[in-house]
Amino acid sequence: MAAAAPDPRRWYALTLLCGTFFMVILDAAIVVVALPSIEADLGFSSQDLQWVLSAYALTFGGLLLLGGRAADLLGRRRVFMVGLGFFTVASLICGLAWSPGSLIAARGFQGIGAAIMTPTAMSILSTTFEEGAERNKALGVWGAMAGLGGTAGWLIGGPLTDGPGWPFIFYINIPVGVAGILLSPVLLRDSRVSTARRSYDPFGALSVTAAMGLLVYAVVDAPATGWSDPRTIGLFAGSALLLAVFVAIEARAKAPLLPLRFLRSRTIVGANLGTFVFSAVGYALPFVLTLYAQQVLGYSAAKFGWSSIVLPLGVVVGATAGQSLALKVGFRPVASAGFVLLAGSGLYLTQVSVGGSYFGDIFIGLALAGPGLGLAFVTLSIAALAGVADHESGLASGLSNTSFQIGGAVGVAVASTIVISHTGDFIAANGPGNMPLALTEGFQAGFATNIVFAAIGLAIVLALLGRPRKAPERAEQIEIGAPQLARD
């Protein structure tokens, strides 16, 4: 069958897709900057503050596979518009939050909208651009947009938080969302899988979401109850059991949420495991950094945003370089370089001090982390779609984004609990007389988690990632369920 002609609107479509992805990243970055203000205004406890990030990441990550499947079956443009509308309304509710519980709940609903929208956007990108240099270029722009979103989030978030207040970090999503909904019918070509059977595997979605929720809650709750406490052990065991149930459901479902044959590809498995670990670093580092800068060094939200611009700009540089290097030298060396830079960043930031300075304690760590995040992100994004037929691009995109969001939730939970534990241990041993020093001890330990995560990520990509493989030519009308995934 002759290949379809390239969509003449594809670069305009990419602009729209990247604009909405920019909004998602912008929202995450802005929230990080505003966390201390949200904590003070709504009365969050230190233990619960991380749920402002994790509630969003859990619903986002847990429902991404279902969102990707819905896009493949119901029509990618239609589902994208529904998700974008849901995200926009949820952003309004977040800005109107009046208590910790209301904000956490609203962030959870916002994550549902993102779970519908984001894998659909990536699936549209995948089916709009042919696999190879052109798609990699598009993914490089997509990855660079993550860095630009972080830059804008930190630059805009600080003045908004210090000025009209933190609710406006959510309100700014509204005009972007409305514009995206209006432009989608004009710029995006609709596509779907032609199949007589439409099944969305709700039990699979429910079990995997519940499993991830228990996992993150167990990590967050463990410092207070004890890692060896029966409650903690029970939560981890429950998460493992639900994951086993999910696998059993997928093995027997006629149209599974995650066909287990996806796991036969070493590259796709390695890309998703690597994405999980990369995201843990990508979320944990700025979470710990903003608390250190504002609570120890006394930075305002605006000053933190301006001073940290080197990180997201570095992401843009790394993503731009990574998209071309991935095809030339392969996935493994490019992703490995990213994780090595992230490990170096974590090592440097473990030296932060109570009387620290920007160039003495922070700048080099950010300068290493930015390109590392960019290289790892774009390479793992390309690898996650390698060898996947067009009609399963939604599933592959959903799986990649699931790994990203759940990894971020776990990363923040682990870093948060380590910071709190080490701070508490220092106070218990030395008394509460020197709180800045106690906090710094905790933040140093939090940054050390990035070294561990980066080392794990490096081991994963060295063991599993290979050179790029091209998908076989497949028609869009092929029914889901046929074994179309290229093995490598």
Image: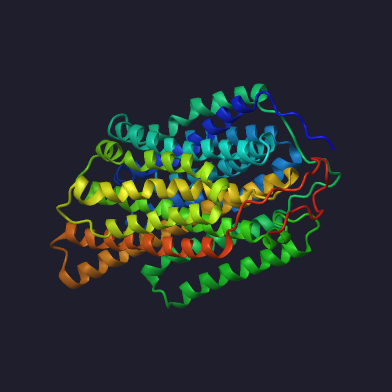
Please identify the quadrant where the C terminus is shown. bottom right
**Is 175 or 138 nearer to us in this picture?**
138
**Quarter that holds the N terminus:** top right
On screen, residue 429 above or below 281: below
Q: Is residue 121 visible?
A: no
Q: Nearer the viewer, residue 488 or 15?
A: 488
Image position, residue 370 (x, y; %): 38, 46
User: Which is more toward the observer, 170 or 267?
Assistant: 267
In this picture, residue 155 sits left or right of residue 211? left
Looking at the image, is 121 positioned above or below residue 201?
above
Vertical side of 49 occupied by 313: above or below: above
Q: How is the image coloured?
A: rainbow
Q: How many marks?
A: 0
Extreme residue toward the front, this view: 328
Percent across and percent down for residue 190 are 72, 31
Residue at point 47%, 38% (across, down):
144
Q: Nearer the viewer, residue 73 or 39?
A: 73
Residue at screen point 50% across, 27% down: 176
Q: Position of residue 248 (x, y in %)?
A: 72, 67
Task: Provide residue 230's location: percent of width, then percent of height.
Answer: 47, 77
Does 185 sit left or right of 354 as displayed? right
Residue 262 visible in the picture: yes
Does residue 486 appear to the left or right of 151 in the view shown?
right
